[in-house]
């Protein structure tokens, strides 16, 4: 997933960090539309479906905008 995210059109960077409660996937995108397109991709969908059975809690997503 991380490799696919890093090479996706519009991706500026992506990284995976270990946190107390699990993991945090961080990324920055050129536009919100680029992120939307990646989230709608088959790679992102397959990743989300594969995670669901092993999650201990709810998956959360947050978006921040600089403008």
Image: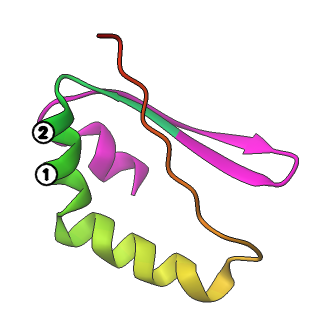
Neighbour tally class for label 1: few under 14, some 14-19, many 20 plus, Cα within 10 Å: few
The percent position of residue 53, horizontal first and vertical second, equals 61, 89
The percent position of residue 3, horizontal first and vertical second, equals 35, 48
- Gap between marks 2 and 1, in whole Å? 6 Å
Q: Nearer the viewer, residue 14 or 61?
A: 61
Q: Is residue 3 above or below residue 17?
A: below
Q: Is residue 3 above or below residue 42?
A: above
> Is residue 62 a member of the stretch shown in magenta?
no
The region drawn magenta spans: 1-25
Disc marking residue 33: 2
Q: How many marks?
A: 2
> Is residue 11 a member of the stretch shown in magenta?
yes
Local SS, label 2: helix
Residue drawn at (19%, 72%) of the image: 42
Tag 2–tag 1 contact (CB < 8 Å): yes
Disc marking residue 37: 1
Res 32 quadrant in image: top left
Q: Is residue 34 left or right of residue 54?
A: left
Q: Is residue 46 above or below residue 41?
A: below
Res 16 quadrant in image: top right
């Amino acid at each position: 997933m991380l490799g696919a995210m890093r090479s996706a059109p519009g991706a500026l960077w992506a990284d995976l960090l270990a946190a107390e409660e699990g993991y945090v996937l961080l990324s920055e995108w050129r536009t919100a539309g680029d992120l939307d397109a990646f989230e709608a991709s088959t790679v992102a969908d397959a990743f989300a479906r594969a995670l669901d059975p092993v999650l201990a809690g709810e998956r959360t997503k947050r978006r921040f905008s600089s403008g």
